[in-house]
Amino acid sequence: MSEKKTFEHVIHERWCKGCNICVAFCPKQVLTLRNVKVFAERPDLCIGCRLCEIRCPDFAIEIREKGVMQPKGKDVGDIDFDLKPEAHHD
């Protein structure tokens, strides 16, 4: 018998505006809003369908399978989005 896959919910609270879209699309009612931000209330029920991740207009939620290596690179939460490109001077 195979082991049940478990999933981690990576929530970028700075980006979450509490629109409730991810909560509405979750077929297992894993997510809820807490203090106007998404929260994984019942993560053990997650089936990893990623509907919440796909539907989030602000990319505020990621679903990762526990025990699976993630691609290397910067974590999106570490990026400074306030950086402005410098003007090109020709």
Image (cartoon, rainbow, N blue to C red):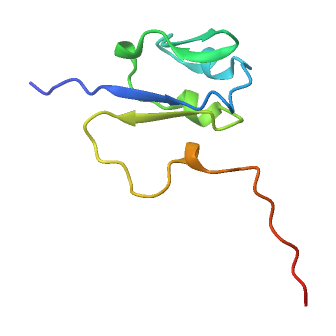
Between residue 34 and residue 49, name the one nearer to us. 34
Within the image, what quadrant is residue 85 found in?
bottom right
Q: Using residue 20 as the reference point, say whether residue 64 is left or right of it.
A: left
- Residue at 26 percent of width and 27 percent of height: 5
- Residue at 81 percent of width and 60 percent of height: 84
Between residue 15 and residue 45, name the one nearer to us. 15
Residue 66, percent across and down? 30, 33
Instruction: Give above or below for 47 relative to 28.
Output: below
Within the image, what quadrant is residue 72 found in?
bottom left
Between residue 38 and residue 89, name the one nearer to us. 89
Q: How many marks?
A: 0
Residue 11, percent across and down? 55, 28
Q: Quadrant of the N terminus?
A: top left
Q: Using residue 69 as the reference point, say whether residue 24 is left or right of it.
A: right
Residue 15, percent across and down? 69, 33
- Residue at 48 percent of width and 13 percent of height: 30
Q: Using residue 30 as the reference point, say whether residue 69 is left or right of it.
A: left
Q: Seen from this angle, which residue lies furthest bottom? A: 90
Instruction: Give above or below for 11 relative to 75.
Output: above
Q: Seen from this angle, which residue lies furthest left? A: 1
- Residue at 59 percent of width and 32 percent of height: 12
Q: Quadrant of the C terminus?
A: bottom right
Between residue 46 and residue 79, name the one nearer to us. 79
Residue 13, percent across and down? 63, 27
